[in-house]
Amino acid sequence: MRIYFATNRDPDNADTPTDFGERFSANGLTDLRFGVAEVSGKKFDRYTLEVADEKLDVGLASAAVGDLSGQKLGSQEVFERVRREMLEQQQDCLILVHGFNTSFAGALQLAARVKDFYATRPMTVFLFTWPSDGSLLPFKAYASDRDDARASGVALGRGLQKLAAYLRGTRPEDYCGQNVHLFAHSMGSYALRWALQGIRSCNGGQLRRLLDQIALFAPDEDDDAFELDHKFQTLPDMARRVTVYHNAADQALIVSDRTKNNPDRLGASGPRNSRALPDKVSVVNCEPALSFTADPTGHHYFYQNEAVRRDVLAVLAGTPPQDIERREYLADTRSYRLVRARR
């Protein structure tokens, strides 16, 4: 299974990487390497990498006169392969941002599982993987990964800007006619917050609508995030629609709330004032449809639960929120609740 990726992790070899580790690149937090992984195995636990060549240094003389023709950008090569696949297969692209305590191998495994789970709607999957290798020391590891997510947000924002620049530079005859979506899971939503703020700081506060659908699953973010300018208030400007999936019984977020001095989590009970959200933001309570036998933590439903899968597929298809089946509308909070299918 093919997974495209960008990462600011440390490569095992700077010139010809064959794997990536648990720390940031030695060249800085925003140093991104782009490539393609072929993931295999029954559990998607094996992979081989093809990392795009990168040459940024053009020499002082060329740099002094603004001649960057000698540069080679790995992003351009990988984006072109993504565009070509989308065009030839007539399928959308899904950008995936993972959460806490995820190794490079685990991130590729997750991306393959997500691609397989939504296989009835084939998509080209593009993974952004950041250093998120929390140990079993919960307080120290969580704090470290949260700092890493914030720092990695700058790299994610840079990657999204590179994608936007590539799309702007593509000739009309090269346009693939497909959509680009983004999934962020858990602490990946916190990284997305800082990507959003980084893009805004570079563009004078202006945002281009780069994405069609943004879906936040179990977001490890504050429940007031959509109310504040320095958090997610302007996120809807980046997409045609934003959907927030939450579960009040999410054990990972309950721990985050009670033991790590975080305020109420967006991915637990949803936004604290969903009535004030823009119309393009939908809030979906997953708890009634979840099976805690399949997922004891209630945190990984976006690639494990059938009811969530059906709902997400409808979102990706552009179905209006009020027309998606097995949703119950809650007028008092202007939100939705998934209804468990009858057997």
Image (cartoon, rainbow, N blue to C red):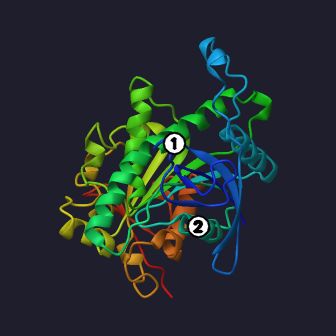
Residue 300, position as x, y percentages in the image = 45, 72
Instruction: Count the numbered circles shown.
Output: 2
Viewer-nearest residue: 280 or 186: 186
Q: Dot 2: within a 10 Å radius of its alpha carbon, few (fewer than 14), some, or many (20 or more) residues?
A: many
> What is the quadrant of the N terminus in the image?
bottom right
Specify whether 280 is left or right of 4: left
Residue 202 falls in image quadrant: top left
Q: Is residue 72 visible?
A: yes
Residue at 27%, 57% in the rendered image: 333
Residue 319, position as x, y percentages in the image = 55, 54
Residue topped by disc 2: 114
Is 293 placed above or below 104 here? below
Viewer-nearest residue: 202 or 10: 10
Residue topped by disc 1: 27
Residue 32, position as x, y percentages in the image = 56, 44
Residue at 29%, 71% in the rendered image: 138
Residue at 44%, 33% in the rendered image: 199
Is 40 placed above or below 274 here? below
Is 263 placed above or below 294 here? above
Specify whether 31 is left or right of 62: left
Is 306 placed above or below 284 here? below
Specify whether 210 is left or right of 331: right
Residue at 28%, 55% in the rendered image: 271
Q: Amino acid at mark 2?
A: Val
